[in-house]
Image (cartoon, coloured by chain):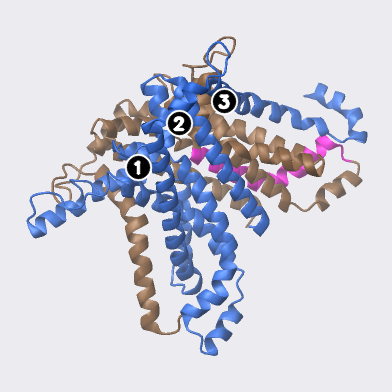
Amino acid sequence: MSDAVAIGAPAIRREPGKFWIVPPAALLALLFFYPLALIAREAFLDDSGVANPAEIISVLHSRFFLNALINTVTISVSATAGCLIVGLVLALILAFVPFPGSGFIARLIDTFIALPTFLVTLAFTFLYGSAGMLNASLMETFSLPLPPVDFLYSTWGVVLAEVTVYTPFILRPLLAAFSLVDRGQIEAASVLGARPFRIVRQVILPAAIPALIAGGSLCLLLTVNEFGIVLFIGAKGVITLPLLIYGKAIQESAYQVACIIAVVNIALSLGLFGLYRFAAGRLGV
Amino acid sequence: MLVWSRPGRIVLWLLFALIFGVLFLAPLAVILLSSLADQWNGVLPNGLTTEHYTDVVQGQAWNAVKASLVTGFLASALALVSGTWAALALRVQGATLSTVLGLLFFIPSAVPSVSVGLGLLVAFSHPPLLLNGTIAIVMIAHFVLISAFTFGNVSAGLARLSPDFEQVASSLGARPAYRLWHVTLPLLAPYLVAAFGLSFALSMGELGATVMVYPPGWVTLPVSIFSLTDRGDIFAGAALTMILVAATLVLLLGLERVTKRATGA
């Protein structure tokens, strides 16, 4: 360390410490970007180093890939829409119709960000599973022979679980945006006879749009990448891209197929990440 | 106040309670209940027991707690050093370079965790870099996934830091290393603690990359919760999940207290 300081010292006057970025950057390059590049290489080239478009095309046209892609996009878009609606309703009440303890509740929801995502799926099994509380009580009350509620092991079970897990990611920027809204403006509009719905539409929503766009694109990204929830639901028909990569690589040892799918998944994620950064940077969230 | 009429407010609060109850409260409550359930055939458990917890503590699960804590601690410590280092070093780069590099440091958070695991398997399964099947590859996977969050937290802290202290120290003749150690890092301390806590929590719950790379004998909590529930032992899975939640919350609250005391807030 002291050697490094001594060597770096003469450079400080000209370009103060420019080279200090090299160690962490090199670490990240070795442990992250190099493996990423190898995924791309494995996807595009076969063992002898020759490009193999036939394999790529056959994977991209395969039924399992297209199904997984459609599932991933459907789940991601539906879950994000759900998060935006639920997040907006919760944030509006927390910020503008507060009740005793609403600050504590907001912080409680915030801690959900730190909890593992599969927790919710496990809980849903007890709540909405075929032998869960909801089905048991409905069967007891109406003496039904079969469990009537059967959405958990479908796309909608995954969507509901993701709405629970990712709503806090919308709530956080929304509450920050709402704390900047001028309360006087709302009271003035209210005194002048504007109905609450109109105030929300004309005063509050314009202030919330940056937070909604940034939070929404973050939700899209996180739901496309979500793995634990889908794995724990374990429904045969609900396979998403990350789950397909896991299945191909670990259960079938088909590494090349897994890498081709991974390239598509990573490209999709990086596109959404770009959208999120653009939205967040542009709107100053 | 947006809604002035009392009935209107009560309707909204009931709506809030319904959403909050169904989406957030019910899952946590039901996990807690099921971890204590004896048998569960009807609407509610037939009886309560702490058996699942004693089973979990005596059995293999204790190893999972240990594996998760060790992995979380080491990966977070490495991510903290590397993230702080990167954030500090980026400050002296030119505007364009620091934007580009800053973006590169954020990218791991955007790549799906399963793909991070797949990449590590592809890259480190052959000599000279043979890490597949070792504990190190689990640590690396966690480090890569949390490094962006640590970097982001520390960068945000640096951006809020008033440059006055450092300039004063500098004008008083403090050398860069002395200034870093005695001025910048202490000022950054609350952000460093927060970054460490968040990355520890993320690491404790990490599943996607871990299932790709974990060797036999280093099974983390989420992986062992999955194998328990996958073979139908959902009550033991719930008990282990409660242990994971409790460990995460204790960690976060403890670090929050440390930060508050340190900053005197």
- Within the image, what quadrant is residue A23 found in? top right
Rendered-image quadrant of the C terminus of chain B: bottom right
Asked whether residue B184 is drawn in magenta, I would say yes
Q: Which residue is mark 2?
A: A60
Chain A drawn in what color?
Answer: blue
The residue that mark 1 highlights is B242
In percent of the image, x 40 and y 42: which residue is there? A70
Which residue corresponds to mark 3? Answer: A40
Which mark is nearer the camera, 1 or 2? Answer: 2
Q: Amino acid at mark 1?
A: Met
Q: Of the residues shown, which amino acid type is indicated by label 2?
A: Leu
Label 1–label 2 contact, CB within 8 A: no
Q: Nearer the viewer, residue A197 or B138?
A: A197
Q: For the residue labelled by badge 1, is the local secondary structure a helix, a strand or a loop?
A: helix
Q: Is residue B69 visible?
A: no
The chain containing the residue under callout 3 comes to: A
Span colored in magenta: B174-202
Residue at (7%, 56%) from the top-left corner? A143
Q: CA distance from mark 3 to mark 2?
A: 15 Å
Label 2: few (<14), some (14–19) or many (≥20) C-alpha neighbours in 10 Å: some
The Cα atoms of the two marked residues, 1 and 2, are separated by 41 Å
As drawn, B182 above or below A282: above
For chain B, the rendered hue is brown
Q: Chain of mark 2?
A: A
Q: Is residue A273 left or right of residue A166?
A: right
